[in-house]
Amino acid sequence: MKKLTLLIVVIALLAACTKDNNYDPNAHLTPTQKDAIITTIVRYAAGSPDAVNNIEKFKPEYDSFYMVKQSKIRFERFFPEDDYFYFLISQPAPSLYEKRHATGGRFKLNDKGELTEYEEIFRTWKMVPDTLQRRSYMLFDKMVKQEDLQQYYTKNSGGVDYIEFPDDRTYYDKQTRSWKAR
């Protein structure tokens, strides 16, 4: 918890000074701070063990499951803006060849370092790493700039894979911090 409180202070200072749209997490955060953020969001972004609900996934008995998930997450992009901290992470996706999917979102922390808001704004289709990097970095930039992403939804993208969720059947519920069917 002390690490996260220190993280808030440092990020708040950076947010006040940084307006050059440098999205490299290393430009904003130390390795310890990056690890603290991933530790905070992994239980939302990485899914749950089989048959474990949204409340049970926070039990200590699942720490080892989430530590494995956390070790596979890449912290791709980060940007502090106003009260929000925007992030882009990627995770391995099931495939015969190396593929990953990316999640772009934002969160807020209170002055104690506790997560008060968390929202996943988009999740990409699984892609080979170089394609994922180009497409997800572009989507991240548009997300930070508050631009509409609907043209990149599957039904609007002209057959090019960008955003898998949200779509007409799936949306992100900020209250439960999970993707849900309509």
Image: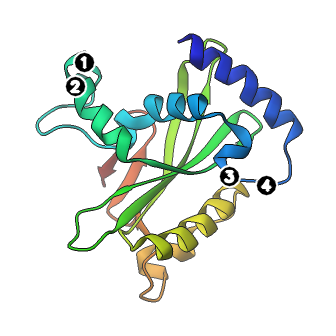
Identify the amino acid type marked 2. Tyr
Question: Residue tagged by mark 1?
Answer: 59
- Front of the two marks 3 and 1: 3
The first of marks 4 and 1 along the sequence is 4
The quadrant where residue 107 appears: top right
Spatial distance from mark 2 to mark 3, Cα to Cα?
30 Å
Spatial distance from mark 2 to mark 4, Cα to Cα?
36 Å
Identify the amino acid type marked 3. Asp
Answer few, some or many: residues within 10 Å of disc 3's Cα (few below 14, many 20 plus, some between 14 and 19). Answer: few
Answer few, some or many: residues within 10 Å of disc 2's Cα (few below 14, many 20 plus, some between 14 and 19). Answer: some
Identify the amino acid type marked 1. Lys
Eyeballing the image, is 121 above or below 153? above
The first of marks 2 and 4 along the sequence is 4
Identify the amino acid type marked 4. Asn
Residue depicted at 79% across the width and 55% down the height? 21
Q: Which residue extends farthest left?
A: 51
The first of marks 2 and 3 along the sequence is 3
Q: Which residue extends farthest bottom?
A: 158
Question: Residue tagged by mark 3?
Answer: 24
